[in-house]
Structures are given as C-alpha cells and as structure tokens.
Amino acid sequence: MPNDDVILAVDAVHATYNHAITALHGVSFEIRRGQILALLGANGAGKTTTLKAVSNLLPAERGQVNAGTIRYDGSDVSRRQPGDLVRAGLVQVLEGRHCFKSLTVEENLVAGGIGRGGRRAEINGDLERIYGYFPRLKEKRRTLSGLTSGGEQQIAAIGRALMSRPRLLVLDEPSMGLAPLIVQDIFQTLRKLNRETGLSILVAEQNSAVALRYADHATVLENGVSVLSGAATELRQREDVRAFYLGQQASPAVKPAHLHAVA
Ligand SMILES: Nc1ncnc2c1ncn2[C@@H]1O[C@H](COP(=O)(O)OP(=O)(O)OP(=O)(O)O)[C@@H](O)[C@H]1O
Ligand SMILES: [Mg+2]
C-alpha cells in the first residue's frame, strides 16, 4: 500500500546511459509531504541522474531506469510524460539556472505561468506572491535576464518553477558558483516557502554544509548508490559522515563500518 504521507518514493533505482554506462545502481529514499530532503554526494555520484529519473527526463538523454520504481503521489513516474508530471506539481529547476536570456526577468516568470496554462489574473497574483519571497526579482523585473547576476538568474529560475505551482520542487545544485551569502539567502527563502506553504522540496547539493542546515532529511549518494539516510540534524553532527562522504576534511583511511545502513 502506498503511504499517503509520502509525496515521493524512490525504491532501489538502477539507471544507465546509452544502455552501457551505469550511473545508478541502488538508490532509495522517501520524501514526506512538507519535508525538505537534501541529496548529497561528490562529483559524479549520481545526483543529477536521480533528479532526472524522478521527472522522467532520462529518456531525453539516452538514459533509462532499468530497475526499481519511482512513485510521485502514488503514481509510477515512468508511465507519465514529463509535462504531465509538471502539471501534477512535480517541477524541476535544472542544473545551471536556465533562463531565457533575451527575455526580461518578469517575462521569464510569466513564461512559467503560461506553461502551466494559468489565466492572466492568476499569473499576476502568483507574480506578486513570488516577488514577496524574492524582492530582488521585483527590482530586476524589467531587466533582461542575460544581464542579471548569477544569483539573480538562479532565483529567476526558481521563481519560474514556482509559477508552475509545484507541490514538490526539485532543485539541482542551486548553490553552484554563487557566493556564500547569496546561497544562504536562497536556502533561507526556500525554507520559508516550505514552512509557509507546505511545499515539499528535493534538493541535490555538493554543498552539504548549507544543505544540511536547511533540510529536514538527507540521503548521501556514493558512486550511484544511496549509502546513508537520516535526519539532517544528526548527519550534521557526525564528523565521520562529513569527513568520509562529504569531503569536508581529509578522508579517514577506512570507511566507518557502522555507516552502511540506509535508514
Ligand atoms: N548524459 C550522460 N551520458 C552518459 N553518462 C552520463 C551522462 N550524464 C551523467 N553520466 C554519468 O553518470 C554518472 C553520474 O553522473 P551525475 O551527473 O548524475 O552525477 P552528479 O552527482 O550530478 O555529479 P555533479 O556533482 O558533477 O553534478 C557519472 O559517472 C557521469 O559520468
Ligand atoms: Mg549534477
């Protein structure tokens, strides 16, 4: 029986590219409604592949899920088109903050609302709500996105995703290439949205320090396998986890044996 409290259930997923390159071989985790889950791991661990599998975007990259299941709101994502998943509230901000650079910030946001099939009055209401969370976007609303800073492009990409009225927002490394203060600001705002609206969030991050500060739960990927899951507060306190999996200090010579269990 699917658990109604769970918005996303990823179970023993294996995935390959070009029928040859194995990217994932055993990824499992669950997100409860209203939770923020951080997916952590080093370069090449499989974070992006996992997120693309969740939105059924792998076929567009000559990739596929070969085993395991992914259920969004109880339904198997492999049977649904990516656009259908977006309309059902599973909305992704891809790696690299894609904006239409020759459109203004506001036009980028409106594009997100039109994609959802929203009416003009609804779109205007959503715009104001998003400007409330990201005042910087309001200041830059008339500026071409291509002329805004990296941080502004990232929040414009998040704002555009919010215009689709997500219930599960998926973000791929929102911190990438941004200054620490901007990263903190973005995570604080995501946390606020989560608290005030109940939005569930799945965020892949190499920056585990910031992700663990704002997430409820975290899952660590290592070479395409989920090796550890737990409450963010617990993982944050464990020096051994930080040292071995998250590369924040010199790795111990031997992987701590007690860290293998996946909760
Ligand atoms: N389009 C692709 N075609 C073939 N192999 C790919 C493709 N995308 C990713 N891979 C491989 O799959 C594995 C997982 O990559 P993935 O991009 O999911 O990792 P990641 O955790 O997101 O890494 P990063 O932190 O660098 O973004 C890597 O070995 C990578 O080389
Ligand atoms: Mg990636």
Image: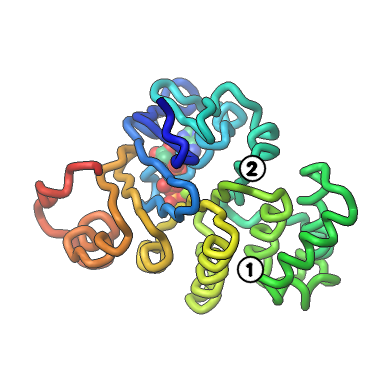
For the point 37% across and 31% down, which residue is it? Answer: 11
Mark 2 and mark 1 lie on one chain; the one further toward the N terminus is: 2
Residue 56 higher or lower than 90, as above or below: above
Judge by depth and name the residue closer to the eye, 23 or 152: 152
> Is the residue marked by circle 2 packed among few (<14), some (14-19), or many (20+) residues within 10 Å?
many
Residue type at tag 1? Gly
Residue type at tag 2? Gly
Badge 2 element: loop
Q: Which mark is residue 89?
A: 2
Residue 142: x and y, percent?
Answer: 85, 71
For the point 45% across and 53% down, which residue is it? Answer: 35
Residue 39: x and y, percent?
Answer: 40, 50
Badge 1 element: helix
Q: Quadrant of residue 238?
A: bottom left
Q: From the image, tell me which residue sits under label 1.
A: 150
- The total of numbered circles placed on residues is 2
